[in-house]
Amino acid sequence: MPLKNAIDLTGRRILLTGAAGGIGAATARACAALGAAKLVLADNGPMDDLCDELRDQGVDISPHQCDVSRRQDNADLVAAAGDIDAAVACAGICPLEEDWADDPEWDQVFHRVMDVNLLGPIHLVRELLPRMAARGGGQIVLIGSIGGRMGGTSPIVQPHYIASKGGVHALIWWLAQRAAPQGVLVNGIAPGPIATTMTATTPYPKDRYPLGRIGEPEEIAWPAAFLCSPAASYFSGSILDVNGGLFVG
Ligand SMILES: NC(=O)c1ccc[n+]([C@@H]2O[C@H](COP(=O)([O-])OP(=O)(O)OC[C@H]3O[C@@H](n4cnc5c(N)ncnc54)[C@H](O)[C@@H]3O)[C@@H](O)[C@H]2O)c1
């Protein structure tokens, strides 16, 4: 009997935060290409063009403006989304300008980064997990970072971002242990530097990279879509290092 392709999202309903961003939009496109029936797209920025593009492909698109750092926004988002088979939490910020050593305002930025990057996924999973468990299972993907693995790859990346992403990795392991017995698989991806708005002003000298370049959003999107698929049915608490060989743990 021929092996059926299990990297297939046919009929799946998938929720993405940070959907307007580089990795989020690429993940939405990858999910659509793999057959997702419905995409619930959440961001605090505009995403009309992405929604039109995906609707033209026949995907049921449900856009939501929200601030992932707010508990109520996540509750409203998940309540409005209906039944969800998989979710990818891509929303994130990486402020670069401040100086952690001398800037008196820096602590406020620290709290904002933690609220968006770490508390945001907690708010989201708190809402999703019981609903997925009640339906017999689901798949959740949190986007961490190579920064949480090795302290960052650029000297201008600030410690709030690094700490938040290390926290995301620890959160994945914590959640995975609690969610797996309920049939919900929680996994993550720790991307290396990827060419998106987030990294547009950061210098990345090519000679520092094993592949001679930083990554493209699609190179994170496909692994994220894979983690939402039946092919990832034995992944729980895994964090995929997708970094072009920059960090090998
Ligand atoms: N680009 C990289 O090099 C890189 C590397 C490692 C990890 N990551 C992570 O990947 C994820 C996606 O980043 P990206 O590179 O696509 O960046 P991006 O800036 O292109 O996208 C981030 C998206 O998150 C949204 N967002 C930010 N704060 C929000 C909030 N409070 N509520 C709702 N939406 C919010 C933004 O509007 C944006 O659309 C982030 O978690 C980021 O930390 C990125």
Image: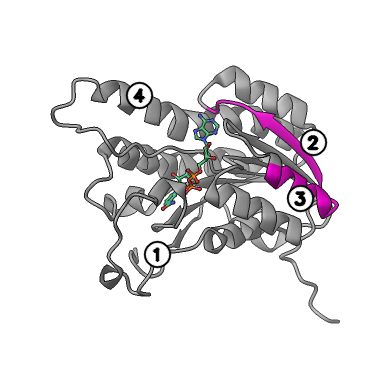
Q: Nearer the viewer, residue 164 or 184?
A: 164
Q: Which residues make up the magenta segment?
A: 49-68
Mark seen at residue 165: none
- Disc 3 to disc 1: CB gap under 8 Å: no
Three-letter residue code for mark 1: Ile
Task: Specify few, some or many for label 1: CA neighbours under 10 Å numbering under 14, 14-19, or 20 or more.
Answer: many
Disc 1, ligand 1: is the CB inside 8 Å?
yes
- Disc 2 to disc 1: CB gap under 8 Å: no
Residue sticking out furthest to the left: 102
Task: Specify few, some or many for label 4: CA neighbours under 10 Å numbering under 14, 14-19, or 20 or more.
Answer: some
Residue wearing tag 1 = 214
For marks 4 and 2 on the same chain, the one whose residue lies earlier in the sequence:
2
For marks 2 and 1 on the same chain, the one whose residue lies earlier in the sequence:
2
Identify the residue shown where x is 82% and y is 55%: 57
Task: Specify few, some or many for label 2: CA neighbours under 10 Å numbering under 14, 14-19, or 20 or more.
Answer: some
Residue wearing tag 3 = 54
Residue 186 in magenta stretch: no
Residue wearing tag 4 = 111
Taking the image as drawn, is residue 187 in sight?
no
Figure quadrant of the N terminus: bottom right
Residue wearing tag 2 = 83
Q: Quadrant of residue 63?
A: top right
- Figure check: 174 above or below 22: above
